Image (cartoon, rainbow, N blue to C red):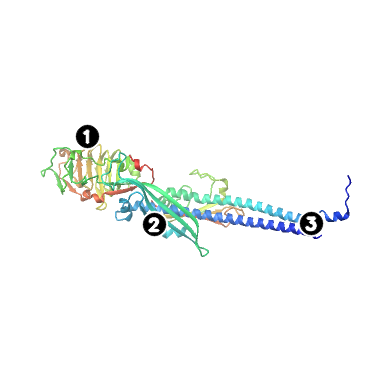
Amino acid sequence: MIFYCSADRFSRKGFSLVEAMLATMILGLLAIYVFTIISESNRGTTNAYYQYLAEQVACEPLEVFRFLGCNAILENQNQGIVDYKFNEWQKVAAVSEITGIERPEEATRFERRITATPIEKGGIKAVMVEVNIRSSLSGNPLGVGPGQQLSRSTIIVNQ
Amino acid sequence: MIERRGSVLLLAVFIAISLTILSLSYFRMMRAVKTTDQRLESQFVAREIALMLREEAMAVMLRDSRDRRSQFFWFLLGAVSGAQTEMRLPLASEKISSLIQSGYTCEFTSRLKVVNFINYDHKNRNYASPKEGHGILAILIEVNLVDERQGRKSVIAKEYLQTQYDYLIASVLCLDNQGSKLCQPLMLRRDGQVLDENSRLQISDFGSRTSNDKLSELELYSRSTLWVGRNLRASALERLRVIDEEQKIIRLNGIMHCAEKLTFDGDWKIDGKGVIVADSFSINGALTKKTDNDFLVLYARKGNIVLNTSEKIEAALVAINPSYSGTIESKQSLNLYGMLLADYLNLDAWSNTPHKISFDEVCRDSEKSFQISISPWANFRSGARN
């Protein structure tokens, strides 16, 4: 079987160099865009994980203190409660030596400061506990980045 | 040529639309992530506020349940299943703003609900007073965190918390249809014992109620379903700070049972109204009330009460048991302000000194004898309490 192709036919079918370059450029842009989204998404997931971890590290003493009660906090404000010290930045350990509470390894990237302020109204005593979390590493894309702080507070009422 | 330009243009338009859609999706996704973070934080704050409100509500409940002047006390004393009342929480009203960021406000309600209240025991026997009984209380907390940053109010987080607690109401005077059973300064269950004016025991203020009818059948605090604590050790009473050895205070609220002998050395203060039921008692110092309304009943259910002090005892002393062998002995001059109930008294065994019993009118005031005890938890067995 013989195919006949005229020069005119070639000039009408297929893509020119400009078209091909344009298509490549658009595809390239798309690829960059998709990679950016994937990369951003990964970064977002990591940030969310660290944000979640920071939340957990902040909420942990609040939960422990709520269980112990207002009086125990106020009585131990100077010496601290187990390994929770007040009014100073403390590195978070993966495992608490005293309580045995275990945390993910990544939690060691955080530092924590706990403050307790006694309050009273109408004969009812309470203590306001504030926990601040900051990153102990510089230049890390943590949920709580350098210079940033996550703060969680609660009020524990004496029963 | 026009056809080719058309196809390239179409392709470019298609790509542009796709990119725009993708960009918008990405933008929306990132905004959603940010909003989710904010919502989680707001939910955390709302939750912490709700927990704080619950704690304050519990503190107010515990305080007011002992205060006859409080609205809460009278609400509970007459409450039926389903009754509800608003609770005022002054600490939360003042301090809640310190937990939320500027631009946000918090609206909350705190209500108290009587889930059920039963005035009969597990054998369907009604208690002496319809006010006595046991039930379940619920604290209902509702918190709305409101965003007011853009001039209009929008609720960004809601938290609803319901917590239930067992409670019981009991009279510390052990009532019958005539009122208090502890109505005379001296009551002896065993027949034929007479103490006249020649006796070394000086008794003042006998009341009008003749209590000797069926005195031999008298039973006290037999409905153990109204006891706050049962079969406790002396160490448990100390742990609960009912008996505070450090401050020498007996803190009372309702009927407590200790399955041991209790000894009170030194001088003690009585704070509150209540009964301590124990096997036997040894009292070696003063027992005095903090206020006129305080009241203590010491009930020896198996043995005797031995007093080895001449200091003032402001309490009702009860020593009775099913074998009618309960008695009270005073090794020194007795100075009792309250009342005394025993199966018999053997004054020959008492010290050879004058002994005095003055009647405390609180023993007759049945209206003021109700005590409300709230448990820190609920076991949902109020209907089958035994």
Query: Which subunit holds the residue at mark 3?
Result: A
Residue at screen point 55% across, 54% down: B37
Residue at screen point 15% across, 46% down: B203
Task: Answer whether residue A59 is visible to the viewer in this image.
Answer: yes
Using the numbered discs, state the Cα–Cα distance from disc 3 to disc 2 in whole angstroms.
Answer: 74 Å
- Say how many tags the image has: 3
Left or right, B62 with respect to B367, comes to right
Label 1, residues with CA under 10 Å away: few <14, some 14-19, many ≥20: few
Asked if residue B163 is positioned above or below residue B91 in the image, the reply reads: above
Could you tell which of marks 2 and 1 lies nearer the N-terminus? 2
x and y percentages locating residue B268 in the rendered image: 27, 48
Left or right, A39 with respect to B357, comes to right
Give the label on residue B323, or none.
Answer: 1
The residue that mark 2 highlights is: B89
Query: Which subunit holds the residue at mark 2?
Result: B
- Quarter-wise, where is residue B72 in the image? bottom left
Do callouts 2 and 1 mark residues in contact (Cβ within 8 Å)? no
x and y percentages locating residue A50 in the rendered image: 57, 50
Kind of residue at disc 3 = Glu
Q: Marks 2 and 1: which is nearer the front? A: 2
Query: Which subunit holds the residue at mark 1?
Result: B
The residue that mark 3 highlights is: A19
